[in-house]
Amino acid sequence: MAPVVVTRTLDDAGKLAALLRARAHGVVEVPAIRIVHDPGGVEALPSAPDRRSGWAVVTSRHGADRRAVACDGRLGAQLAVVGSATAQRCGELGLPVAVVPDRFLAEGLLERFGPPDGSTVVVAQAAGAAPTLADGLRAKGWDVEV
């Protein structure tokens, strides 16, 4: 079989690479992203729920990990996630998830948000991530903090 290039971080590639190898694929691991600690972003998370935040959005399991550490069990907001793997990770961390969209994309999550309720939506996402979710929420009238 043709080789498959896995672009996940080395920490994340193992499970997928093993499944592909079990199906007789050659696997080449070429990480296309790197997970780094951004103190400015992570340090903002604990105080965000205390500032009229009604919602927190986590877009990856790495975001869930950071959210759990930063908030130390004090979520203070309803939690929305983009996909089932992120929801599963939140569950493992004891973070209750209120919304998981049917389509695991920012657009799917936007469909689940109704009219604004006067609170802020705190979006925890990777630096350089597309502004689709934040822009879409703002277009609906939500106050958004990325």
Image (cartoon, rainbow, N blue to C red):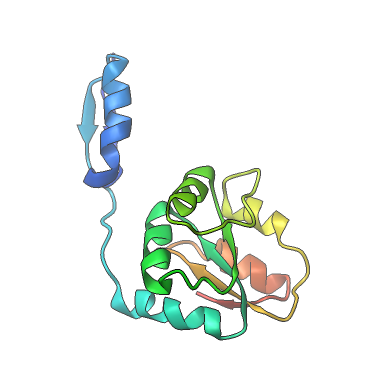
Q: In this view, does 94 lie above or below 144?
A: above
135 lies left or right of 27:
right
Q: Which of 127 and 72 is in front in this view?
A: 72
User: At which x and y percent is residue 113?
Assistant: 71, 62
Q: In this view, does 125 lie above or below 90?
A: below
Q: Name the spot of residue 138 as percent of width and height, x first.
A: 66, 74
Taking the image as shown, residue 114 lies to the left or right of residue 136, namely right
**Res 92 seen here:** yes
Residue 92 position, x and y percent, is: 43, 50
Q: From the viewer's perspective, is residue 138 above or below residue 14?
A: below
Q: Is residue 127 left or right of residue 136?
A: left
Give coordinates of residue 74: x percent, y percent. Answer: 49, 73
Residue situated in front as seen by the camera: 3 or 62: 62
Q: Which residue is drawn at 41% across and 65% down?
A: 68
Quarter of the picture containing the N terminus is top left
Q: Where 20 sits versus 109, above or below? A: above
Q: Residue at x 59, y 71 (%)?
A: 77
- When asked about the image quadrant of residue 98, the answer is bottom right
How many circles with numbers are drawn on the protein? 0
Residue at the image position 52 percent from the left and 49 percent from the top: 87
- The quadrant in which residue 97 appears is bottom right
